[in-house]
Image (cartoon, grey):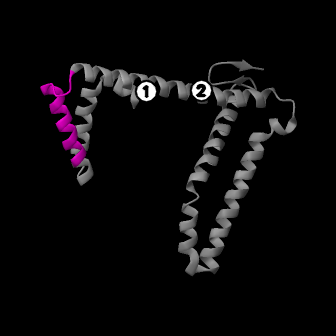
Amino acid sequence: MAGMIATLGLPMLITVLKEVLGGIDTPATKGAAKALEQVDGLIKTGGISPEQLKEANRHTEEMARMETEEFRASVEQVNQSLRAEVASTDPYVRRMRPTFGYLMAATWAAQMFGIAYVIIFDTPRAGEVMAAMASLSAIWGVGLSVMGIYVYKRSEEKRAGREQIFWNGDRVQ
């Protein structure tokens, strides 16, 4: 998002958001579109000076640069972890992905069997248990995201014929 602002500039972003939000029929989006209309008017009439606009765009470009650096650092961290796993002679470290996958599968199965049991044998509490399960969605999202990266990397390894290829292009035999 910040990259788009840095590329297009604040006036263009205001115009786009004003149109998009104005097309959504809720009081909040209509109010936001009206506020953006006022900001757009201030820009066009000089109520916001070119210097202020230039500073806002500069600030946005800096935020986009920082966001890009943060993403780059996080990808590098993942790459370092994967390199350490591949280079390790410790059998457990090399088997981390399958172990994690089996644990995720067992945990998922235990949760599903528990829910099925409650639905079948303790039906009055089923709604309460289903609501409690929904509160676990964030933790499952994290675990399944990690699992997705593991599966993706393993598929990549298989395509490469045991040659390890990392996101930045490094190769390890």
Residue behind mark 1: 63
**Which residue corresponds to the image point at 53% horizontal and 73% vertical from the top-left?**
127
The image quadrant where one finds the N terminus is top left
Report helix, strand or loop for mark 2.
helix
In the rendered view, tell whether residue 33 sits above or below residue 110. above
Observer-nearest of 62 and 13 = 62
Question: Splitting the image into 4 quarters, where does residue 124 fall?
Answer: bottom right
Total marks shown come to 2
Three-letter amino acid code at disc 2? Answer: Ala
**Residue 32 within the segment the image draws in magenta:** yes
Report whether 88 appears left or right of 11. right
Query: Which residue is situated farthest in the left direction here?
Result: 45
Task: Say if residue 127 shows up in the picture.
Answer: yes
Three-letter amino acid code at disc 1? Answer: Met
Observer-nearest of 57 and 14 = 57
Question: Splitting the image into 4 quarters, where does residue 129 fall?
Answer: bottom right
Residue 73, disc = 2
**Residue 28 within the segment the image draws in magenta:** no
The image quadrant where one finds the C terminus is top right
Q: What stretch is highlighted in magenta?
A: 31-49
**Which residue corresponds to the image point at 25% horizontal and 27% vertical from the top-left?**
12
Residue 2: x and y, percent?
40, 29
**Which residue corresponds to the image point at 25% horizontal and 40% vertical from the top-left?**
20
Report whether 40 appears left or right of 143. left
| Mark 1 vs 2, N-terminal side | 1
Report helix, strand or loop for mark 1.
helix
**Which residue corresponds to the image point at 39% horizontal and 22% vertical from the top-left?**
61
Please rate how many residues cluster around mark 1, counting C-alpha atoms within 10 Å: few if below 14, some from 14 to 19, many from 20: some
| Prevailing secondary structure of the magenta residues | helix
Task: Say if residue 26 shows up in the picture.
Answer: no
